[in-house]
Amino acid sequence: MNSATCRLLLLLQIAACCGGCSGGKTSQNASPDGSGEERYTIVTTTAMIADIAAEVAGDHADVVSLMGTGVDPHLYRPTTSDTTKLIGADVIFYTGLLLEGGMEEALERAGENGKPVYAVSDGIEETDLIVSEAFDGHPDPHVWGDVSLWSDCVEFIAEKLSEYDPAHAEEYRANAERYRGELAELDAYVREVIGGIPEQKRYLVTAHDAFSYFSRAYGIPVRSVLGITTESEAGVDDVNRLVDFLVENQVPAVFVESSVNKRNLEAVIAGAEDREWTVKRGGTLYSDAMGAPGTYEGTYIGMIDHNATMIARALGGDVPETGFRGKLRLASGKVE
């Protein structure tokens, strides 16, 4: 355990001991509607979870995400500012499944000591998780790639907020039902556009293995330079194996990721060119982090819409130019 995690663990334990017996809401933030109702604070690790929490909690809570645009959760280490935010949180949500490896133990210990701390992946049936031999037989944590599985996390968050704030439980469940309806429509869109890619071109090649759930849900085989976690380094053999795959299957495009260094994928592209197969750069996907706050791609729906639309367009599918909701930005006829 590194020093930052040790410090976070100690401070969260102290905060839990001080506040764990009070019960109910503790924050004193004023409601924006002028009702005078107290608001509480939800802190999440990733922005994907924050997006769910904001949809479900509505005006009853302030939601803070620790990890912003382009942040790799596999390599993330908590800062002093994060510690302060976590100590001040009324409810904490994180992904689990070792995604937040640098701080997961501290979060679990804080939960054991009284602070409401939940791994949203606990809302997914264990049989629906993908177990990877490359990850020592541990479940793959990139569950948000399958929209239907991520929708189960929405229900989980609604139930936990209902337990914390029972006075608004009916509203939380109604918000979750509405949002899950939107996700069902998104899931159908992704299934349609990925299914429309010509089968011989339907291969998704990325920087690291963050799309296994996306692959299984939407029927597109995935290959990557790195494994599930970005903590490892790609070797020459990893690059050469992927080059062989591109050339043998005549894959037309590969995709970089917003939170992962693209140098390994650039080596793959160069290797394919040396073997007289030109591979285009299909664009940048959001894998472990969403787009910038305040943008459409900075929402979970926008993130998945962006990914699915870009993949389908680059691989020869017939998709709407502006995606699922007509909100994707275009540049020179391509989704960016």
Image (tube, helix red, strand yellow):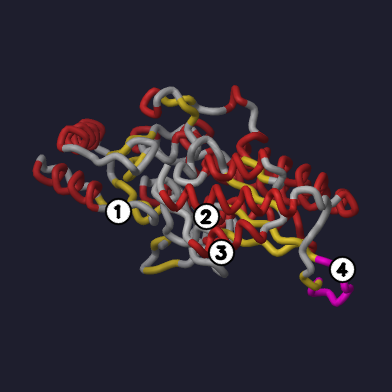
Query: Which one is earlier in the sequence, the residue at label 3 or at label 4?
Result: 4
For residue 37, the mark is 4
Q: Is residue 67 left or right of residue 55?
A: left
Q: Which residues are magenta?
A: 31-38
Q: Mark 1: few, some, or many residues within 10 Å (few <14, many ≥20)?
A: some
Q: Which residue is mark 3?
A: 296
Q: Position of residue 268 (x, y in %)?
A: 20, 44
Secondary element at image label 3 = helix
Q: Does 312 lie within the magenta span?
A: no
Inspect this view and state whether residue 191 appears: no
Query: Which one is earlier in the sequence, the residue at label 4 or at label 1?
Result: 4
Q: Which residue is mark 2?
A: 303
State which quarter of the image contains the N terminus: top left
What amino acid type should be assigned to the residue bearing mark 3? Tyr
Query: Which one is earlier in the sequence, the residue at label 3 or at label 2?
Result: 3
Query: Which one is earlier in the sequence, the residue at label 1 or at label 3?
Result: 1
Secondary element at image label 4 = loop
Q: Mark 2: few, some, or many residues within 10 Å (few <14, many ≥20)?
A: many
Q: Which residue is mark 1?
A: 261
Q: Residue furthest left?
A: 274
Q: Position of residue 24 (x, y in %)?
A: 83, 52
- Answer whether labels 4 and 1 touch (C-beta < 8 Å): no
